[in-house]
Image (cartoon, rainbow, N blue to C red):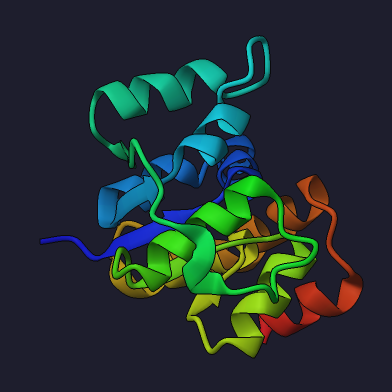
Amino acid sequence: MKKSILIDASSAILLFKSGWMAPLMEHYRVETGPAAFREMTVADYRGASAFRQWQQEERLVLHPRCPSEMSIGTNRQGLDPGERECITLFLSGTGTIVVIDDGPGAAFCRREAIPYVNALQIPRLLSQASATVVRQDVQTAMQRIYASGRYAPWILEYALT
């Protein structure tokens, strides 16, 4: 049985653009909520058809309803709907880790001791889980994801170490 990961839209899109979404789904059960899925599948956006296909193939698991957001309390300023969903799903017992790239969501996870990674860390995570991911390519992959995203330089430095 694969471990379950919850992912928000910005992380999924970054991983799609860098070619790491498919490897992530090979090694983990990747789950998301309806708001994040809507963000991933905006018509004519890059990757929208792939996300729809993966959901139909059950490689990307869509939770049709999100549990009550009351479990994350009032300390959720700055979280977009997809981030709130991922965190709420995690707090309701779904998933073992959250993949989230937006600063307020990552800060919330740190404050609340919710295990999370950002998209930059997925190549490293998969290199430890699989012999098919060439370890020397991990830093190159992280640099590619960094170039596609909006990260502060210290985030890349931290991820590389």
Q: Position of residue 107 (x, y in %)?
A: 72, 78
- Give the tally of numbered discs: 0
Left or right of residue 26, residue 1 in this image: left
Corner quadrant of residue 100: bottom right
* Residue 56 vertical position relative to residue 69 in the rendered view, above or below: above
* Residue 111 vertical position relative to residue 24 in the rendered view, above or below: below
In which quadrant will I find the N terminus? bottom left
Residue 87 is at least partly visible in this image: no
Q: Position of residue 19 (x, y in %)?
A: 53, 40
- Please name the residue shown 68% across and 60% down the image: 101
- Please name the residue shown 18% across and 60% down the image: 2
Q: Position of residue 109 (x, y in %)?
A: 60, 78
Residue 112 is at least partly visible in this image: yes
In-front residue for pair 71/123 = 71
Outermost residue, top side: 44
In-front residue for pair 22/144 = 22
- Please name the residue shown 55% across and 44% down the image: 12
In-front residue for pair 130/26 = 26
